Image: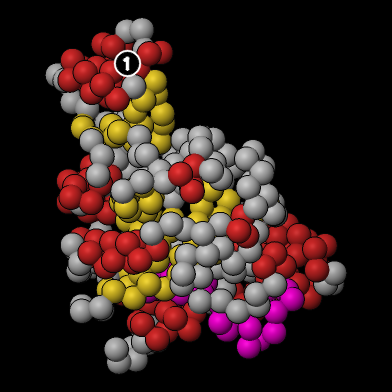
Amino acid sequence: MPSQGFSPVTRLRYLAGRARRIDVGSVIDRAKEASAQHGKALPLVVADMLYQAGVKNVGFQDYIDYDFAILTPAERATYMTHPVSNQISQKYDHPDYRGLFQDKVEFDRKFSDFLRRDWMVVEPDNADELRAFAERLGTIVTKEPVGQAGTGVHRYHAAEVEDWAEFHRGLLERGEILVEEVIRQHDDLAAVCPGTVNTTRVTAFFDGSTTHILAMAQKFGRGAVSDQMTFGGFYTMLDENGHALGAGYDSHGHVHELHPDSGARIADFQLPMIDEVTAFVDRVARVVPQVQYVGWDIVVGPDGPVLVEGNWGAGVYENKPSVTGIRTGHKPRYQAAIGF
């Protein structure tokens, strides 16, 4: 694909917006964290963080998460960052089609062939339908149509519902109108954390003819309804063959050599059916070709991959050098596929 840079005007507007939103106290707190962990002088870390943010397009949390304090300039240049990812999203994800990904109900309708689970929408007059749906499945997951990082996702057991009219009314009032069957995950995923459906984040770019897989991360939960960090979850990066690159980690300084609950060694994890996952991502990426850059959340089930959702603001998952020993990131893959 021909090289295409990002508009200087867009970049300047983005930087100006970031400057207006800087929380100085938060920056200092993050700098203290990096200073203590890596033995670097606090003033130097603060100055470096500000320089990286203003000149090199590195988010403050990126600086912490990817251990920029101990990386050389050449190593830093290999890391994808959230500001750069956001610019890619703005350029390659057409605004007219983003709503299909932002609204979970619309997403389920558009990608129904890839969900491989039952789902329904709560409406004012379908309390009986909701009850029949929930009692047939036993456990259901409800979602607010618009949410991120696992917010607005809940899990209910039909046996615990005493008043179905009240339950139905409560879902409507809280906006939990999307109701889904709980995904059954592959035994290899359940062996690590059986109480949470553990998703694989596959970041991909569709150039109009080829789907490029840019990065893969395996997320693990702690028994909650979601594997997001807000629920105590963490992740490890996967190589091209679906094997973990090291221990698990999150954005709160926690490192997990072993899963805290199951004791499974994270570095030993192998994503099952990796070839099927790759082919599956290629198929879903072609459904809405106007949204080219997507972070796909997938669960490998007993019979193959299942689509959870797609994120047009793909986010970033990267190697953490202090955990994995790997001091390079995935940015060259992005550059080769997208051309920037």
Quarter that holds the C terminus: bottom left
Dot 1: what SS?
helix
Q: Amino acid at mark 1?
A: Phe
Q: Is residue 251 visible?
A: no
Residue drawn at (72%, 67%) of the image: 322
The stretch of residues the image draws in magenta is 67-88
Q: Specify the quadrant that holds the N terminus.
A: bottom left
Q: Main secondary structure of the magenta part?
A: helix
- Asked whether the viewer can see residue 6, the reply is yes
71 in the magenta segment: yes
Identify the residue shown where x is 30% and y is 33%.
Answer: 181
| Depth check, front residue: 230 or 305 | 305
User: Where's residue 107, x and y in %?
Assistant: 23, 49
In percent of width and height, residue 255 lies at 69, 54
* In-image side of 23 versus 113 (left or right): right
Q: Which residue is mark 1?
A: 167
- Judged left or right of residue 338, residue 317 is right
Residue beneath the point at 40% across and 86% down: 336
Count the marks: 1
Closer-to-camera residue (283/97): 283
From the viewer's perspective, is 13 left or right of 43? Answer: left
Residue 45 sits above or below residue 73 on the image: above
- The residue that appears at 63% across and 47% down in the rendered structure is 264
Q: Quadrant of residue 176?
A: top left
x, y percentage for residue 129?
Answer: 17, 20
